[in-house]
Image (cartoon, coloured by chain):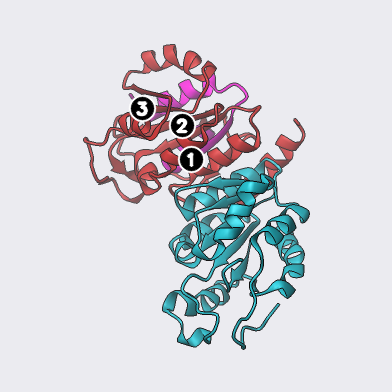
Chain colours: A red, B cyan
Amino acid sequence: MQRRDALDVLARHRGGAVSIATMQTVHHWHDAGQADEFNLDATGCMGSASSIGLGLAMGRPDRKVLVLDGDGSLLMQLGTLVTIASIAPPNLYHVVFVNGLYESTGNQPIPGQGMVDFCGIARSSGYPAAHRFDDLAALDDALPGILDAPGPALIELTIDRDGSGPRWPRVPMAGQVQALRAALAGQE
Amino acid sequence: MTTNAQPLVHSVAGDVLAAELRRIGVTHVVTVPDTMQRTLTAALEAQGDPVLVPVCTEDEAMGVNAGLYATGHRPMLLIQNTGFYASLNTMRGIALDAQIPTFIFVGDFGRDPTKPISESPARVRFTAPTLKAWGIPYYRLDGPDDVSALDGAFAQAYERRGPVVVIIGAATA
């Protein structure tokens, strides 16, 4: 499964969810037309996407929040799985793209490459739901049901290594935060 | 606030601080527990407003604070100096680069209020110099007379959209 294709599926099913993209999910999320006022790019703070998403989910329980995380990023703040499970926001959906690489720094292998079971860690941390997909059609078929069910849910996506090298949209997060804050205030 | 030149003789009651945080409009206190602020944490838990949000690491606390801010809330952090050092890169990325108001109570764990800071362990000696090096405004809360400055310090974090720290120099009572 290619990350690009998986992100297209996620974009198609996003609905009105607030999205948080990080690292190498960012550029294609933009290409897929998802960099609207309800999106944040968690750039310059690797590992923080899920905790920012947790704050958003707590602050606006009426809105679904979709976190687009990476395996290397999640490993940097793995404890966040326990925090999320403990607070258990029903509107938080945590997607983790797994290719076993730190792509942004030159495709170095992550620790535990090929061994880490993110669904297993999520379940044992207390996530009520965890799903793994390596097939695009299966993801497309299951995603509406997952997003209709209460979270928090972890969605682990096994993706191919594309070797295209890192890309960055370079949209400052500071401006996005203010735009999101204003947009959410307008929909209270 | 006090200059910290003299040994500390007073501390502030946790319930007084909890009430003050509610009065100035703090909505959430995101925390990794701090030895110096045990009674404040307990008072916040009993009071229920602001909402106490325990997290696993200070890095996470910065992220949760940012998410809550983006949804219109007015959160803050309650951590200790050791965790503050651990989360500096996240503070750089979120509080400074992404310009998120980040109001932080940092307990100066290891400080002996009867001795000058120069005789304290590194984790105490380096707190203020680190904040100065990063250009982060900070205040000291060493006794009851310092409580009145919290309102302005909290407002400063929102006005400048960045971090503002209050160093808790004596254990809350």
- Residue identified by numbered label 2: A94
Question: Does the magenta run of residues contain A78?
Answer: no
Give, as a three-letter code, the residue at label 3.
Leu
- Indicate whether B10 appears above or below B160: below
* Mark closest to the chain's N terminus, 3 or 2: 2
| Crowd class of label 3 (few under 14; some 14 to 19; many from 20; radius 10 Å) | many
Total numbered labels? 3
Q: Is residue B161 left or right of residue B31?
A: right
Question: Disc 1 sits on a residue from what chain?
Answer: A
> Are both tags, 3 and 2, on one chain?
yes
> Are both tags, 2 and 1, on one chain?
yes
- Residue identified by numbered label 1: A50
| Crowd class of label 2 (few under 14; some 14 to 19; many from 20; radius 10 Å) | many
Give, as a three-letter code, the residue at label 2.
His
- Residue identified by numbered label 3: A157
On the image, which quarter does residue A90 sit in?
Answer: top right
Residue range in magenta is A1-30
Q: Would you say residue B97 is visible in this rendering?
A: no
Q: Quadrant of the N terminus of chain A?
A: top left
Tell me where residue A89 appears, x and y as whole percent: 55, 31
- Indicate whether B1 appears above or below A110: below
Q: Are marks 2 and 1 in contact (CB under 8 Å)?
A: yes
Q: Write the residue at 62% across / 88% down.
A: B6
The tag on residue B69 is none
